[in-house]
Image (cartoon, rainbow, N blue to C red):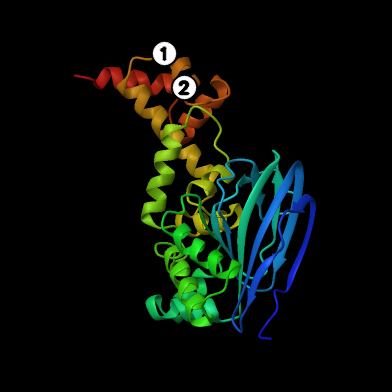
Amino acid sequence: MGFSRNLTYRTEGIEVTAPLRYRHFDTVIADLWHARAKPDASGFYASHNPRIIVFFDDVGDAIRITNDEGSTASRPMARIAYVPPGMPSWTAFSAAIGFRHLDLYLSPGLAQGMLAGRMGKIAAAAALRVMVERREPGDLLVISELLAAEVAAPKHGEVYVLGLVQALLGGLFGDTARTPADPRLGGAQMRRLREHVLAHLHRRIGTAELAAVVELSESWFNRRFRAGMGLSAQAWIARLRAQRACEMIEQTALPLHEIALQLGYTDQAHFTRAVRAYVGATPGGLRRVAQETRP
């Protein structure tokens, strides 16, 4: 009937706690799971079809996910996520937890057809190649609960289910779609990243952390960031840190070693190299110039 999930998966330490509920239509397969995981549970999942995953329980940091095999960087599991076809996911649990989640498998072309009317066929295809995650689900959780209720106790047909799926996709992709000609991160995303970095310059900021800020997988974040900025995220952070260092040297009376400490430089030599690379002068030389030119 219709299509299949085309799902490859393996789990350890996860047990199903209630019978699986599912609906199978020509264009959508919906699975409603109740499960419990041990503290060291893990899972691997990959489907040839695009899919949407919804966690109805706030699992916090108990479940972490990565889309890069062998990566030591992971991020908290989002409450709702769109996963492009073929993208693998590895999950790891750090606490015993029970959860209820909904998996929606979409037939080839369905998601693109649903989004094409609003953003165009090409833009929709480009958007659907990128993983989208929502840690604050808002109204999308209400739509998901309606879908779960229909799966658990069917009252309506495929038209009703497809309407809810389209509403869910519209909410997920409301502000994330980019065209192939403009694969960069959006202006709002860059502002969130800049604010986050400037608030945490005192410590190391990993790429996985930045990806989580804009709710993207690390691999997709790296590609989109470099496409827009022309440099890596870490090089951008180094530039912001050096810029802030120069501002503090010129505008405050803080000792140079205190500035270095506040901005997370590992030692004075690292601090000196970063400032010299940014403005062509040492921290001491920059301060002397600032003092000489100050009214």
Pointer 2 or 1: first along the chain: 1
**Residue drawn 41% across and 50% down?**
190
**Residue drawn 56% across and 32% down?**
204
Q: Quadrant of residue 104?
A: bottom right
Query: Which mark is drawn over residue 276?
Result: none
Judged left or right of residue 271, residue 152 is right
Query: Which mark is drawn over residue 262?
Result: 2
Which part of the image, by quadrant, shows the C terminus? top left
Q: Quadrant of residue 10?
A: bottom right
Q: Is residue 71 visible?
A: no
Seen in the picture, residue 122 relative to 91 is either above or below; the reply is below
> Around disc 1, counting alpha carbons within 10 Å, would you say few (fewer than 14), some (14 to 19), or many (20 or more)?
few
Which part of the image, by quadrant, shows the N terminus? bottom right
Q: Nearer the viewer, mark 2 or mark 1?
A: 2
Q: Is residue 295 visible?
A: yes
The residue that label 1 is drawn on is: 255
Judged left or right of residue 294, residue 182 is right
Q: SS for tag 2? A: helix
Residue 248 in the image: x percent, y percent?
36, 24
**Residue drawn 48% across and 44% down?**
236
Label 2, label 1: how far apart the Cα atoms are: 11 Å
Type of the residue with mark 1: Pro
Residue 122 in the image: x percent, y percent?
47, 79
Residue 266 in the image: x percent, y percent?
58, 24
**Residue drawn 29% across and 17% down?**
291
Residue 211 in the image: x percent, y percent?
54, 49
